[in-house]
Image: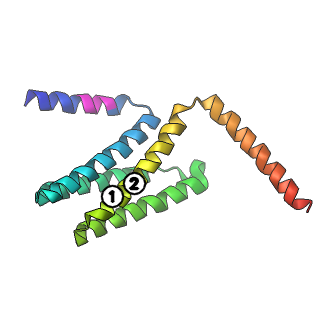
């Protein structure tokens, strides 16, 4: 009992003190873990536990969707919203059809996004700004190249 309370306190403290980047990563990890556990519980015929983990994963993806900033994120935020909606539909379909292979598809998508976010948050902001400037300069060169044709 005390150990469980200690773990919950540690997790809560981790969430409260985490920066936004770490929170996003923790959400992806949580969704992935819950889907994997849901699959295991289904295989063990522990359907109530499976449902609880499916719901946790959907709640996490929902939270990721609610945290999107469409003003700052623009097209990327809209694309992520579409992906999150797709994932939730696939999870619901997997649960309704008892097709845990679909869960693997969603886990794969979440892992790809997690990897991308880890890369984004691992780089210092100055380096990201420098890349953005280079990308902008390259895109202007490409556009001017097309216009001279």
**Position in image of residue 140 (x %, y %):** 81, 50
Query: Mark 2: which secondary structure?
Result: helix
Does 139 sit left or right of 77 as displayed?
A: right
Does 69 sit left or right of 141 as displayed?
A: left
At a point 24% along the width and 57% down the height, the residue shown is: 54
Q: Residues within 10 Å of mark 1 (few under 14, many from 20)?
A: some
Q: Residues within 10 Å of mark 2 (few under 14, many from 20)?
A: few
Q: Which mark is residue 108?
A: 2
Whole-angstrom CA distance, mark 1 to mark 2, is 6 Å
Q: Residue furthest left?
A: 1
Q: Which mark is residue 142?
A: none
- Residue position marked by numbered label 1 in the rendering: 104
Residue numbers of the magenta segment: 10-14
Name the main secondary structure of what is drawn in magenta.
Answer: helix
Q: Marks 1 and 2: CB-CB under 8 Å?
A: yes
Q: Which quadrant holds residue 132? A: top right
């Amino acid at each position: 009992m005390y150990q469980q309370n200690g773990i919950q306190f540690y997790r809560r403290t981790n969430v409260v003190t985490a920066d936004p980047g770490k929170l996003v990563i923790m959400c992806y990890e949580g969704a992935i873990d819950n889907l994997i556990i849901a699959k295991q519980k289904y295989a063990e015929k522990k359907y109530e536990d499976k449902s609880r983990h499916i719901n946790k994963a959907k709640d996490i993806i929902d939270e990721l969707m609610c945290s999107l900033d469409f003003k700052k994120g623009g097209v990327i935020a809209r694309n992520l919203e579409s992906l999150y909606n797709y994932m939730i539909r696939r999870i619901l379909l997997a649960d309704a059809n008892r097709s845990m292979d679909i869960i693997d598809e969603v886990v794969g998508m979440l892992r790809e996004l997690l990897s991308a976010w880890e890369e984004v948050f691992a780089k210092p902001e100055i380096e990201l700004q420098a890349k953005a400037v280079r990308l902008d300069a390259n895109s202007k060169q490409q556009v001017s190249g097309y216009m001279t044709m």
